[in-house]
């Protein structure tokens, strides 16, 4: 999942981004409303962590404009991060289109819990545990297993599996995966998506286990809800 952190407090924005990256999310940063809108016009973010009080275009206007013309036609979830804790301020944020509201200072654990909750809502899930076939991913505990076998995944492989499991049976192009699982520093001209899909596929399959990630020639990849033994395995 790809997240945009928007805050004019540079140290806070960097700290939030580092923490979310440790949780396996792809994170970009903006320090004012104008640059946030510029980034959001180019990238279909799954979630925006948005400060209210910023010079120039404030968070309320950014939130409102994110709803007007989002990339791919789907607006991101918006989590307001603000020092304003009055009930009128919360109402204003929600009325401008925010999905949730977190008052500064906050514990990072609460932030990540709210992020998981909002992304579950985006994927129409009710818990932090994803289940597809015999594969289980616990987002809160950052653990994944297939049957009784624990999967030893890198942070990026975990993030990729989480995204696949949130979009089961959907064909996802390399470009789409690059936009949602990698951040703005990823080189679109490398084979990083193909390589990561290949290593994840191999870790998901052990011996006679059915392949779960299908390569759809010319289109991308698909995580199968009901994998078939003997499904084609390709690194690309």
Image: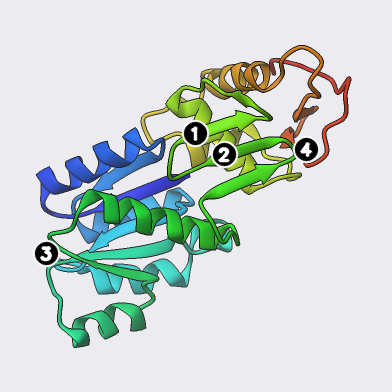
Residue that carries the numbered disc 2 in the rendered image: 137
Q: CA distance from mark 4 to mark 3?
A: 47 Å
Question: Counting other residues with Cα less than 10 Å from the Cα at mark 2, is it few (<14), some (14-19), or many (20 or more)?
Answer: many
Q: Judge by depth and name the residue closer to the eye, 201 or 189.
A: 201
Q: Callout 4: helix, strand or loop? A: loop
| Rendered view: 221 above or below 108 | above
Relative side of 138 to 205, left or right = left
Q: Callout 1: helix, strand or loop? A: strand
Q: Judge by depth and name the residue closer to the eye, 28 or 211.
A: 211
Residue that carries the numbered disc 4 in the rendered image: 224
Q: Quadrant of residue 111?
A: bottom left
Question: Counting other residues with Cα less than 10 Å from the Cα at mark 3, is it few (<14), some (14-19), or many (20 or more)?
Answer: few
Q: CA distance from mark 4 to mark 2?
A: 15 Å
Q: Which mark is residue 55?
A: 3
Which numbered disc flags the more N-terminal residue, 1 or 2?
2
Q: CA distance from mark 3 to mark 2?
A: 40 Å
Residue that carries the numbered disc 1 in the rendered image: 143
Which numbered disc flags the more N-terminal residue, 1 or 4?
1
Q: Residue at x 51, y 23 (%)?
A: 153
| Rendered view: 63 above or below 177 | below
Q: Callout 3: helix, strand or loop? A: loop
| Rendered view: 127 above or below 234 | below
- Residue 66 in the image: x percent, y percent? 40, 66
């Amino acid at each position: 999942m790809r997240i945009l952190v928007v805050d004019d407090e540079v140290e806070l924005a960097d700290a939030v981004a580092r923490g979310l990256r440790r949780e396996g999310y792809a994170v970009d940063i903006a320090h004012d409303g104008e640059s946030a809108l510029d980034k959001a016009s180019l990238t279909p973010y799954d979630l925006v962590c948005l400060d209210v009080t910023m010079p120039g275009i404030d968070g309320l206007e950014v939130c409102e404009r994110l709803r007007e013309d989002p990339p791919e036609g789907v607006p991101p979830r918006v989590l307001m991060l603000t020092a304003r804790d009055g009930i009128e301020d919360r109402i204003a944020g929600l009325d401008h289109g925010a999905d949730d509201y977190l008052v500064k200072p906050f514990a990072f654990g609460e932030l990540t819990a709210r992020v998981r909750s909002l992304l579950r809502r985006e994927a129409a899930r009710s818990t932090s545990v994803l289940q597809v076939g015999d594969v289980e991913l616990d987002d809160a505990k950052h653990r994944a297993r297939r049957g009784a076998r624990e999967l030893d995944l890198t942070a990026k492989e975990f993030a990729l599996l989480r995204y696949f499991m949130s979009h089961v049976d959907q064909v996802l192009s390399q470009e789409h995966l690059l936009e949602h699982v990698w951040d703005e520093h990823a080189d679109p001209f490398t084979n990083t998506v193909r390589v990561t899909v290949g290593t994840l596929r191999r870790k998901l399959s052990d011996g006679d286990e059915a392949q779960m990630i299908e390569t759809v020639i010319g289109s991308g990849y698909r995580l199968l809800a009901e994998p078939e033994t003997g499904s084609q395995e390709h690194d690309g």
